[in-house]
Image (cartoon, helix red, strand yellow):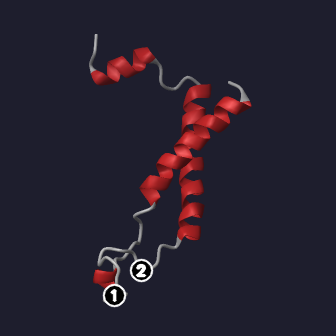
Amino acid sequence: MSIFTALAIYFVIWWIALFVVLPWGVRSQHESGAMAPGTDPGAPVLTNLGQKLIWTTVVATVVFTAWFLAYTYRLITLDRLSTWLGLP
């Protein structure tokens, strides 16, 4: 596998991880009681986006490393996968 393919796969995993991490710790204005005039009650109070980007990178790196090891050492093959799923 080329380095560009690995980077592309990491990029896709990173974006998926971002959507997983985004809701972590979000509190709405309604939940916190700090309503700003003219805003939706469901709008977040603090997003902590910098911290979420760090967590996204950590999660994506762990998932990519697991995928890369499984790919490199052929830990998951089509035959093994069909056996796990009970397919003939």
In the image, residue 28 above or below residue 23: below
Counting other residues with Cα less than 10 Å from the Cα at mark 2, is it few (<14), some (14-19), or many (20 or more)? some
**Residue lying furthest right in this view?**
3
- Quadrant (top left/top right/bottom left/bottom right) for the N terminus: top right
Q: Quadrant of residue 71?
A: top right
At x 44%, y 54%, the residue is 19
On the image, numbered disc 1 is attached to which residue?
A: 35
At x 54%, y 41%, the residue is 12
Total marks shown come to 2
Left or right for 2, reference 8: right
On the image, numbered disc 2 is attached to which residue?
A: 45
- Where residue 37 sits in the image (x, y, percent)? 35, 88
* Amino acid at the residue labelled 1: Met
At x 31%, y 76%, the residue is 40
- Where residue 53 sits in the image (x, y, percent)? 57, 62
- Given residues 37 and 10, the one toward you in this image is 37
- Given residues 57 and 19, the one toward you in this image is 19
Residue mark closest to the camera, 1 vs 2: 1
- Where residue 70 sits in the image (x, y, percent)? 55, 30
What element does badge 2 sit on?
Answer: loop
In the image, residue 29 above or below residue 5: below
